[in-house]
Amino acid sequence: MLDQDHTDSISTAIENAIETKTAVHITAGNSKSFYGNSCDAKPLDVSQHRGIIDYEPSELFITARCGTPLKEIESVLREQQQMLQFEPPHFGENSTIGGTVACGLSGPRRPYNGSVRDSVLGAHIVNGLGDYLRFGGQVMKNVAGYDVARLMSGALGTLGIIMQVSLKVIPMPAAEKTLCFECSRTEALQKMNRWTQMDVPITATYFEQNMLYVRVAGIESTLHSLKQTLGGEELVDDNDIWTEVREQQRAFFNDPAPLWRISIPEDTNHAALFDNCVIEWNGGLRWVKSNTSDNEIFSVAGAAGGHATLFRAEHKKTNCFQPLPPSLAKLHTDIKRAFDPHNFLNPGKMYS
Amino acid sequence: MNPSSDIFAIFENCLPSANILATVEKLRPYECDAFTAYKSLPLAVLLPESRQQVINIVKRCQRENIPIVTRGAGTGLSGGAHPITNGILLNLSKLNEIYELNPTLRYARVGPGVRNLAISDAAEEFGLYYAPDPSSQIACTIGGNIAENSGGVHCLKYGLTVHNLLEVTFISAHGEEITIGNHCYDYPGYDLPALMTGSEGMLGIIVEAKVRLLPIPQNKEIILAAFNSVEDAGAAVSSIIASGVIPAGLEMMDNAVIKATENFCHPGYPVDAAAILLCELDGYEQELQWEVEQIEQNCRRHKATSVSKAKNKSEQELFWKGRKSAFPAIGQLAPDYLCMDGTIPRKHLAHVLSQISELSQQYELPVANVFHAGDGNLHPLILYDANQENDLARAEQLGGKILELCVEVGGTITGEHGVGIEKLNQMCVQFERTELDQFERVKTAFDSNRLLNPDKVIPTLQRCAEFGAMHVHKGELPFKDLPRF
Ligand SMILES: Cc1cc2nc3c(=O)[nH]c(=O)nc-3n(C[C@H](O)[C@H](O)[C@H](O)COP(=O)(O)OP(=O)(O)OC[C@H]3O[C@@H](n4cnc5c(N)ncnc54)[C@H](O)[C@@H]3O)c2cc1C
């Protein structure tokens, strides 16, 4: 497919939507359409609006139209020994950069190098009034006006169509290695919590079934000395484990029960309710397979100081995000109204 | 509000009367922040001692329709904490308690009036520190840092305030207490901590913050490289970043600043150099040595006349001392200066610096440059004398031109100091009306009656129209006598 600027056709589609008062459901690669609440609105496919607009390795940023495939971006960066710091999950062949930013999902590297929103430098959006707006830019530091560009990350398209986005990129580490430790869940949590307080270049952690996997990064001598410091066995064939973790291709994820994403403080003792789980991010991200009621899961995650998201389920989802306290919920409604007063963009996708 | 009504009576049930300042002598110290070009007095300065008192005050102001300007330490450089004559100045410096340090989860929970450096000082016993380190860190408060999204010399590697902020509790314009964010790796709903960061006191009054602490790097090196031309130094910066090394800090100073700081605190800088780069690296053992070599090679390749590594901790501190005292040192060169804050893509450093020096000659005002070169954040300091007729107006015009130049090369009018009242005109250059209207609607979502820091950051339609007209008549400002904010 060719790089193409579809600003006009997307703008026209929004104008039509406004004229005919019909809401739209923004779609692109459909790789993450399972994420968020279901949205009953007319699909608006933005995947044709694609192409890398600007990439300068020495400036550490890349600017691309929303429909640009994530894999194209990653391969262009790889040629220059660079990468996206948040190691985004693709969840499918056709994953786009716009959808990646709108969903705000980060992968294994997130606790160590930063999240999607951390790397957003600027965005062009079309809001629910049909205005084409530019916020932020391509430079690392920019405080002119409110940080609307970053606000788009994780907003699931409810505040605007992300037309193009500029993201910070970082150099790839010289090399990476995976160490593994056979241990219980409690021991794994203790180890990870101890390491976070040390100045060591860990770039991913994953625990499943009595095995803790730790990825470390650096030049050869660093990797060698890290093995001395941290201990563990070197995983010889480690090519795929981090892809499998990121893409949820480990056997754990095959269980047909609903998949919950539990984001909680790293040192939280593991609740019995979350027994069937795998752990990432130093203990801060726990994937749980469970048929327990939504409310019970929300309340246990909330009580621990975190939040839960019903990530994947067979049934149609209407309330998959942690309920917000009333004053915060009202603020969300007011902000939504500030961008999309008539509720034309992805209605109900996040909070109704 | 009836201007003659007694301010003490209005706020008597909100906070102790000893914490209400209303006489001219007591208000005088608050007539401006560190953007000193304009001065005015508020109705009163209120110094609440608790969150509840803040809530009382806000509710009272909402009822009486009195605008509120929140102030931390008043070190802001764009007039964010500049008082409004018909409003109150809410000084949060008494909310300066560190409530909690959590070494396991690596965060500090603090009041808004806690000074930036106080957090790192308190965290040191756990081997942790708070990374964003504005040069004003001895004085500036975390509330002000969040409101401005402050950076520092280490934000190239460790990010700005927004990257190190976990949770914020603020009092809304209606007096409600709202918490956004948490100390996990993400939170449900919109990214409101990002929206609040850099919002310059216009969306809420921050009464508590949780910030990320990081392990203090075990190994650190500082390299000082001198160059015969600013262009060479600029080119070295680009090639260092392109080589795949992200230094913890990468700062540049031009000859005017080198001389001024050397005079001021004797850090041992080469006074005959056209520019110096100060590069800090931290990292894991051998890796650090490899990075040091990369930096040295890149500087030499771009014709550095000398490259030296600080020999020990005290020399490291000395190297930094010069950089950190750059502003006061410049302060000795002229009675007044304006500090600009544009950010540009690094590759345009040499071009922009030479344009700035041309503009400096054209406007007949000296400009000294000291800045965060690694992230392209310029701080041209325009030296002037407020007692000379027209000096300030010329300095402002020159500053405006520099910022427009930054926008022209794909940068922004402010990297870390904020818009405040200072850069309202340049907001008209950087943004279209529809974009400014979107900002306005965001403001309304938080503060429908426009009570919090009104008339800052977002220029009115009329103002942009007038500024556009001003541009047409280059140089000669119409309505010379009107205050321009
Ligand atoms: C010598 C010098 C060096 C500097 N170096 C740097 C630097 O390296 N990097 C950098 O980024 N900045 C720098 N600054 C600018 C300044 O120090 C920062 O902007 C700082 O964050 C301001 O903090 P403050 O507490 O002084 O805030 P103030 O100046 O009091 O206020 C700044 C803004 O924040 C708002 N505000 C303050 N507290 C709150 C709160 N609790 N809730 C809501 N809004 C609030 C105010 O309304 C105002 O808009 C420097 C300033 C000086 C004078």
Image (cartoon, coloured by chain):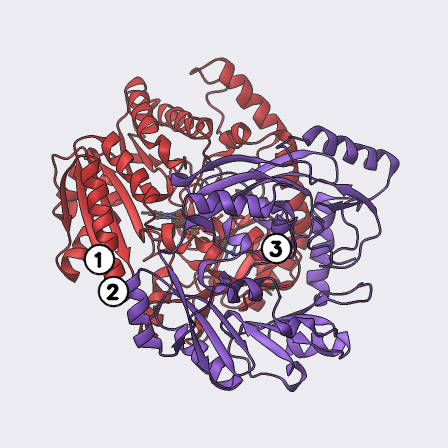
Chain colours: A purple, B red
Amino acid type at image mark 3: His
User: In this view, which residue lies farthest toward the top?
Assistant: B473
Is residue B329 visible in this depiction of the protein?
no
Q: Position of residue A329 (x, y in %)?
A: 72, 61
The image quarter containing residue A295 is bottom right
**C-alpha distance separating marks 3 and 2:** 35 Å
Residue depicted at x 28% and y 34%: B235
Q: Secondary structure at mark 2?
A: helix
- Disc 1 packing (10 Å; few <14; some 14–19; many ≥20): some
For mark 2, name the chain.
Answer: B
The nearer-to-camera label among 3 and 1 is 3
Amino acid type at image mark 2: Glu
Residue depicted at x 66% and y 71%: A253
Tell me if the residue at label 3 has its CB under 8 Å from ligand 1: no
Of B433 and A215, nearer the camera is A215
User: In this view, which residue lies farthest toward the right?
Assistant: A20
Specify whether disc 3 shares its chain with disc 2: no
- Disc 3 packing (10 Å; few <14; some 14–19; many ≥20): many
**C-alpha distance separating marks 1 and 2:** 7 Å
The residue singled out by tag 3 in the image is A90
Image quarter hosting the C terminus of chain A = bottom right
